Image (spheres, rainbow, N blue to C red):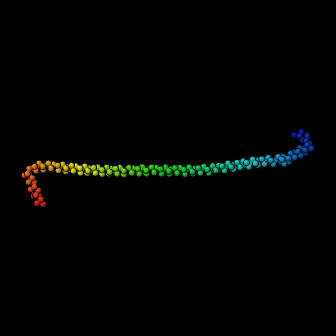
Amino acid sequence: MEKLLEEFSLGLFVWHSLIFIALIFLLKKFAWKPILDTINEREDGIKNALESAEKAREEMTLLQSDNEATLKKARAERDSLLKEAREMKQGLIDKAKTEASLEAKKIITQAQESIESEKNAAVADLKKQVANLSIEIAEKVLKEKLSNDQSQMELINDLVKDVEIK
């Protein structure tokens, strides 16, 4: 350090100081402002990017909550539609069962009426046949019984007695 003090030159010091001050002045005038502007622009860009990221995060949160609400609404609507479809299906099944039951009862009633009608027709036909057969038998019996005159007279007398009694 003593060597530095011995070699110290005031002129050289002044020149160095002047050059240093000139260099600082030149740097301040020409370089310092563009450097600070670049740093400020960079700082503003970072700040804007952070603000944009924060806004995007808030929008994502808002969209996510909207999506969840929409999803809940869609699920509720789906459940409502499924419930309505099940109720409609059950209603259609019940209606079909009721209609089938009524149709079956109607068919059974018609069949019973048809059977009763056919039975009555058969009974009437049977009565008619029995009556015809009875008449034929009576005719044959009467022909044979009334084949002689004496039997005819007895029958006439019996009929007259029956008429008088009434």
Q: Position of residue 61 (x, y in %)?
A: 62, 50
Quadrant including the N terminus: top right
Q: Quadrant of residue 161?
A: bottom left
Q: Is residue 81 left or right of residue 143?
A: right
Q: Residue at x 50, y 50 (%)?
A: 81
**On screen, residue 165 above or below 143:** below
Residue 59 visible to the viewer: yes
Residue 17 visible to the viewer: no
Quadrant including the C terminus: bottom left
Q: Is residue 155 left or right of residue 93?
A: left
Q: Residue at x 11, y 48 (%)?
A: 144
Q: Nearer the viewer, residue 13 or 134?
A: 134
Q: Position of residue 125 (x, y in %)?
A: 23, 50
Q: So how many labels did they put on this image? A: 0
Q: Position of residue 115 (x, y in %)?
A: 29, 49
Q: Residue at x 9, y 56 (%)?
A: 157
Q: Nearer the viewer, residue 50 or 164?
A: 164
Q: Nearer the viewer, residue 5 or 67?
A: 67
| Residue extending furthest toward the top | 3
Q: Position of residue 54 (x, y in %)?
A: 67, 49
Q: Residue at x 76, y 48 (%)?
A: 41
